[in-house]
């Protein structure tokens, strides 16, 4: 793809993202980056069409119409992730708390067993 043509098509994707932001009245922090021809794989070894990294929607589709479709998909996915983010944070904090508690208890047990085995020898 010629550089000038790529810039024109990237502008169309930015315009589409702006339209989505206005319609949803959300996601104003997002930017779109189009990398046609770049191949990236998911954890399941499937080629990705797009992904959200931080505040960037990265698109890998070669075709502009496909990239627009992927942009919509990734935008909606981002909004849904934002909706569940507080719950994910809560669960992660609980996990961290219980890991700390378990570690503390394990250390007490190790110390007790060390003392016990020291008495037996």
Image (cartoon, grey):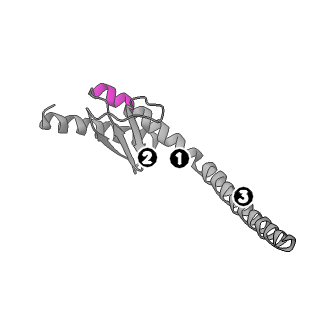
- 52, above or below 107, in the image: above
User: Which circle marks residue 27 in the picture?
Assistant: 2
- 27, above or below 20, in the image: below
Q: Quadrant of the C terminus?
A: bottom right
User: Which circle marks residue 98 in the picture?
Assistant: 3
Q: Quadrant of the N terminus?
A: top left
Dominant secondary-structure state across the stretch colored magenta: helix
Classify 10 Å Cα crowding around label 1: few (below 14), some (14-19), many (20 and above): few
Nearer to us: label 2 or label 1? 1
Q: Residue 37 or 102: which is nearer the viewer?
A: 102
Query: Along the horizontal axis of the image, is 106 left or right of 3?
Result: right
Question: Which tag, 2 or 1, sits closer to the chain's start?
Answer: 2
Residue drawn at the location 53% of the way across and 43% of the way down = 81
Query: Along the horizontal axis of the image, is 105 left or right of 43?
Result: right
- 21 part of magenta stretch: no
Q: Residue 83 or 92: which is nearer the viewer?
A: 92
Distance between the Cα atoms at labels 3 and 2? Answer: 34 Å
Question: Which tag, 3 or 2, sits closer to the chain's start?
Answer: 2
Q: Secondary structure at mark 1?
A: helix
Q: List the residue tagged with mark 1.
A: 82
Range covered by the magenta-colored residues? 64-70
Measuring from the top left, give residue 51's x and y in whole percent. Answer: 41, 39
Classify 10 Å Cα crowding around label 2: few (below 14), some (14-19), many (20 and above): some
Measuring from the top left, give residue 63's x and y in whole percent. Answer: 27, 26
- 69 part of magenta stretch: yes
């Amino acid at each position: 793809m010629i550089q000038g043509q790529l810039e024109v098509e990237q502008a169309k994707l930015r315009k589409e993202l702006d339209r989505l932001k206005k319609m949803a009245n959300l996601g104003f922090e997002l930017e779109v980056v189009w990398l046609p021809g770049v191949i990236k794989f998911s954890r399941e070894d499937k080629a990705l069409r797009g992904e959200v990294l931080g505040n960037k929607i990265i698109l890998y589709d070669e075709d502009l119409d496909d990239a627009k479709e992927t942009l919509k998909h990734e935008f909606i996915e981002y909004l849904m992730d934002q909706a569940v983010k507080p719950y994910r944070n809560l669960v992660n904090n609980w996990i961290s708390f219980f890991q700390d508690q378990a570690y503390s208890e394990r250390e007490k047990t190790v110390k007790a067993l060390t003392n016990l085995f020291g008495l037996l020898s």
